[in-house]
Amino acid sequence: MKFSWKWLVELSGTDVSAQEAAAVLSAKACETEVGDDGNLEADILPNRPDLLAHLWLARELASLTGGKFRGPDYSLNTGGDAVRVNITDAAACPRYSALVVRGVTVGPSPESLKMRLETLGLSSVNNVVDVMNVVMLELGQPLHAFDLAKLQGGITVRMAAKGEKLTALDDARTEYGLDPSVLVIADGSGPVAIAGIKGGASTAVSGGTKDILIEAANFSPSVVRAGTARLNLRTDASVRFSYGIAPAMTVSALARAAQLLKDVAGGTAESAAVDAYPHPSKPVTLMLDTGYVRGLLGADVDDDAIARILSGLGFTVSGSGASMSVAAPVWRTDIRRQEDLIEEVGRVYGYENIPSRAPVVYAYDEWGWLNEDEDVPWDEYGFIRERTVLAHRLAGMGYAEVYNYAFISDELKEIFGLTTLRELAKPQSEEYRYLRPSLLPRLVLNVRDNLRFANVVRLFETGHRFTGDGRETSRLALAVGAKKDTGELFFELKGAADLMLQEMGITDIQYDDVPPFAFATLALWCAPGRAAEVKTGNGTAVGVVGLLHPAIAAKLKVRGAVAVAEFDLRTLIRHAQGEREYEPLPKYPAVERDISMLVNDDVRIRDILQTIQRADASDLVRDVDVVDIFVPTGDEKLAPEFSRHEYGKSVAVRMVYRSDERTLTDTEVTAAETAIKKALQDELGALIR
């Protein structure tokens, strides 16, 4: 928005240069720069429509630079009845004021008026129209002049009827087709102006006009914006109405127009204006706690300085001490609460004068700590720290972190067989209709979409999931997708989970594939026989690892296989070992021996490992790793032992033997190995190969 620097100087009484004024306005009001012609160009914020006017921008400038504001006080009586005004929709038009001025002589404007308009890029039309534009630029309130003799009856502010038309007051005399989305000013013959946008040619002021009716109205910003979009017609008036103008400015603008018309057109105004104001707005008066001002700003601004700053901006301050009564000026429609006043004090006082201090915050949520609530919105510092460390570990393992919206669609709800979900009252779209009960549905979509660009995709996410009763719990989800599954995808993700848990210090892990599961819903999304609940040594369930069910993968059009896992993040962190124990490197060498066996289908790997631990009476086994699992299919050539004994699978384990006191002999290792083989045969019915 362009502003005349000469005009601002006249109104503000400032003695700073245009460059200095632009700098201080940019720092404390709105972005401003000096144009090539020496005038100011300001980027007015949406919540400061008052600054669209030279008068109020000059007041800001005077307050910020120590000038003396010279703005006049325009007053005019209301209650006139020269014309009847009817407002059909008070929301679309909160106020409509009008003033009759008789005996005007329409002609060229004086040079001073022309220059003021031309400086701001407006062309002079005639003295009456020019006065309307000057008042709009000065006070921010658009005006329109009707030829009173051409009006047929009273004024009605209403929505246009379908099929109505209006010939606009422009050089081309453009005809606009109207509809009920456009607000119009009408007389007995029909629309005579498009409200807040453009006047009509039928009632235009011309050289023979003697009596005029000046309109100063207040229109809803949304209604004006809708009309502008519908007609593709943007004017200086519509821009100002779109920002939102204070209804209180209408009568002041009429008073100022009457003054100028008397000087440049010889007109005499009626003693009172017609004023239709169905629901008058009340002046905003707030109680300001000066102690709260200092606390919120973090600066020691004394009471006198607070009162002086607000008074300089046009606020009326009464009272003193800890509590002040502050009345907002009528043009400040953005003032609604005490914090708005504190913002005014802060920006004029100068943010550069507020000392920088480290904020005082709790390292954890005090409310949640005292009430032992583990799922409060503000997590304690320890949880945030551990979650960050965990994310770094997963990234180091080749997993990329994703962030999804916490909502799912009807389609995902149906595909995953979900029932009791929390539905949003006003969802942003059908894609985000329900609060997610798990992180996996959207994570699987991420894998599906990324498999278009890679053969293998590894992703993880941390975030909240929501139960049917509205509770939030923190979860960690992992997913691995591959275009071609060789049968190892489940074990790859299980290995990643093992490594993650070991890095957290959770070493006593069990994988239970026997229902019922604590994470029953997650297990149902996995393929039969390819789901395991992860438990700690004391039996606490922390999550589920599994291969996504082929039926779900097919419905989601996943081109490949996906292994998924989801953990209760807080439970994981609670079981993590914060302290790590270190031991010296072994002095004596280790001995590795492999045992290959055939076992029945119902024998689980956990059973084998536990049997080996129990059989190690000499306490020489330091580590046991499963190195191979083979399950034959019907078309494979089977080893004779399979068919002879009807075993279901072959398992190979590698054991590491070592003593902390001596180098082991072959006899000692063989004795320990023999005891383990016998236990496997006796307890599990294994056939040692």
Image (cartoon, grey):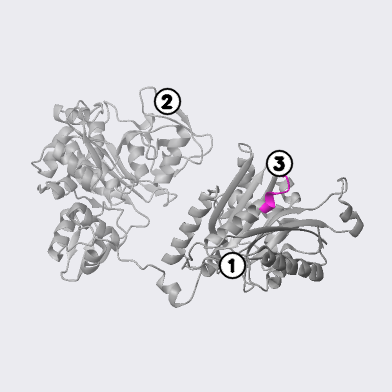
Q: Which mark is residue 484?
A: 3
- C-alpha gap between disc 2 and disc 1: 100 Å
Answer yes or no: is residue 183 visible.
no
Specify start and end residues of the magenta stretch as a single range.
483-491
Q: Does the magenta stretch include residue 489?
A: yes
Q: Residue 685 carries which label?
A: none
* Picture layout, residue 509 above or below residue 234: below
For mark 1, give the secondary structure: loop
Q: Is residue 445 left or right of residue 73?
A: right
The label nearer to you, 3 versus 2, is 3
Name the residue rendered at 55%, 47% in the picture: 398
The label nearer to you, 2 versus 1, is 1
For mark 3, give the secondary structure: loop
The label nearer to you, 1 versus 3, is 1
Question: Where the N terminus falls, by quadrant?
Answer: top left
The image shows residue 457 at horizontal and vertical percentages of: 61, 44
Query: Hey, what amino acid is under mark 2?
Result: Thr
Answer yes or no: is residue 569 visible.
yes
Question: Where the C terminus falls, by quadrant?
Answer: bottom right
Q: Residue furthest top?
A: 172
Q: Is residue 469 left or right of residue 177?
A: right
Q: Mark 2 points at which residue?
A: 174
Task: Please identify the quarter of the rendering in which residue 449 is found.
Answer: top right
Asked if the residue at tag 1 contacts the one at tag 2, i.e. Cβ–Cβ closer than 8 Å, the answer is no
